[in-house]
Amino acid sequence: MEVGDMRVLFVVAQENFRDEEYSVPKGIVEKAGVSTATASPDGGVCRGVLGGRVKADLKLSDVKPGDYDAVVVVGGGGSQKYLWNNRELHGILKSAFDGGRVVAAICLSGAVLAKAGVLKGREATVFETPESLKALRDGGAKHVREDVVVDGKVITAVGPQAAAEFGERIVEALGT
């Protein structure tokens, strides 16, 4: 499949997602010729921690994981409140992972991948808090202190400073 035929779904929290963890990787993916869509738990306008506003294209309940070649979960403080325990998102990630698609998360959202059951036995990184580290441990991940960790088709990044490399690794994973 050509990169230009691929689709990537970005998932953001309704409130307090990290603006640059969304805009930087999304820009890199789009520059590579990959089409994108954005989803959130409730759809509509979502607000970033730095004041950015994003209109979600769809609600998580309307996502069909098979329509996307990658699912990318954006971090920020809102991740823990809106995404960590979202069963719809867990199902989307598990379905994508089981289907051999790329699954990726940045910042606190590495915990979402762990809670979805896709990090068992894999190396991963996360923005370190006691809760996020516990989520990785409970999910069976091996925590690695690096900006970006790629383990097969699973990509995790530590935070905003890694947003560009995170986007580049997503594009690379789509090309394989």
Image (tube, rainbow, N blue to C red):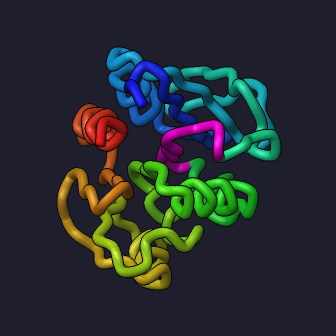
Say if residue 160 shows up in the picture.
Answer: no
Image quarter hosting the N terminus: top left
Q: Position of residue 162 (x, y in %)?
A: 25, 41
Residue 59 rendering spot, x and y as whole percentages: 77, 37
Between 22 and 34, the one lying in front of the other is 34
- The residue sitting at the left extreme is 146
The reply to whether residue 83 is in sight is: yes
Q: Residue 142's image quarter?
A: bottom left
Left or right of 160 in this view: 118: right
Name the quadrant containing residue 117: bottom right
Q: Which of 6/123 is in front?
A: 6
Q: Please identify the residue farthest to the front as the structure is shown.
A: 1
Closer to us: 104 or 35: 35
**Is residue 103 found left or right of 80 in the rendered image?**
left
Residue 151, image quadrant: bottom left
Residue drawn 40% across and 49% down?
106
Residue drawn 53% across and 29% down? 7
Q: Is residue 74 magenta?
A: yes
Q: Which residues make up the magenta segment?
A: 66-77
Front position in the image: 117 or 145: 117
Look at the picture and state if 103 lies above or below 135.
Answer: above
Please say whether residue 60 is one of the residues in the magenta stretch. Answer: no
How many numbered callouts?
0
Left or right of 61, for residue 146: left
Residue shown at 57% from the left, 54% from the top: 96
Quadrant into which the C terminus falls: top left
Residue 98, image x and y in percent?
55, 63
Examine the rendered structure and indicate whether residue 145 appears above or below residue 138.
Answer: above
- The picture places residue 91, in percent across and down from the top left corner, at 69, 61
Q: Residue at left 28%, top 70%? A: 123
